[in-house]
Amino acid sequence: MVHFTAEEKAAVASLWAKVNVDVAGGEILGRLLVVYPWTQRFFDNFGNLSSETAIMGNPKVKAHGKKVLTSFGNAVKHMDDLKGTFSQLSELHCDRLHVDPENFKLLGNMILIVLATQFGREFTPQMQAAWQKLTTAVANALTFKYH
Amino acid sequence: MLNTQERAHVAQVWDLIAGHEAHFGAELLLRLFTVYPSTKIYFKHLGACPDEVLLLSHGQRVLEAVGVAVQHVDNLRAALSPLADLHAHVLRVDPANFPLLIQCFQVVLASHLQDEFTVEMQAAWDKFLTGVAIVLTEKYR
């Protein structure tokens, strides 16, 4: 069970309050699909993913990115019980979606990079460490029900 | 390895770093040690809490090597051969650590460039740095 210090929780919450989930979600998912193109395998029915511009502008990518990041918001609200919070999603990602857990790490990396672009110098090494701890813990929680 | 546009993205970002290798390098190492504390074992010579002077000097060395890679993107193997020997035979850095350094590099670029750190820039630098890491670990066995 991951323990977050009061400072780490504060760091995460302070930044999260300023994130525009609608916009950032699409940015994060779009970057994942562009920088790690093999991840497109999970989104065959999303239409045009043929170029960087197509991916970043794709309405299904934006909508799904928003959905994913909104779900990530639950992690921020329940940092003390990530396994419980993501239990059903873990089963979904294993049994129905068949997503290699490695991809959770990659998505976590994208979240941090997009936060860095948005917050600049405010995204200090300590902020990065707190957020890395959270995305790693979420990735582990999503993998927990894999078999 | 990199197409014309990717090279342009790499060169464009390098223009901002050139002359400031020490500061970018210091920030890179500080982020690496803060976010991934296990990586400090490779830098014992910097001490448990490396001060700014040590981070700056070592950071400069690391970023100057990246600069060499930028100048020789068509021939990384030859240009980085001495460093590849060093990492294989002397430093023996577990290859799993290179993605951690690359991630921190991306965060440094993203936090400095912000909106200018477009997805195309990120993709080009990810591809470039991964290529450098492959060359640096090629002689391991």
Image (tube, coloured by chain):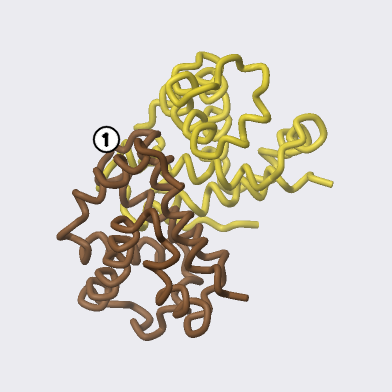
Chain B drawing hue: brown
Which three-letter amino acid code belongs to the residue tagged 1? Answer: Glu
Count the numbered circles shown: 1
Rendered position, B104 above or below B36: above
Q: Is residue A60 left or right of residue A20?
A: right
The kind of secondary structure element at disc 1 is: helix
If the image is split into quadrants, where does the N terminus of chain A sit? bottom right
Q: Is residue A146 left or right of residue A127?
A: right
Instruction: Indicate the chain coloured yellow by its letter.
Output: A
Find residue A107 and report its image quarter.
Answer: top right
> Which residue sits furthest left?
B19
Residue nearest the viewer, comparing A20 with B9: B9
Q: Chain of mark 1?
A: B
Q: Which residue is mark 1?
A: B116
Q: Residue at x 28, y 33 (%)?
A: B115
Mark 1: give few (<14), some (14-19) or many (20+) Cα within 10 Å: few
Q: Residue at x 55, y 73 (%)?
A: B139
Rendered position, B130 above or below A60: below
Q: Residue at x 63, y 76 (%)?
A: B141
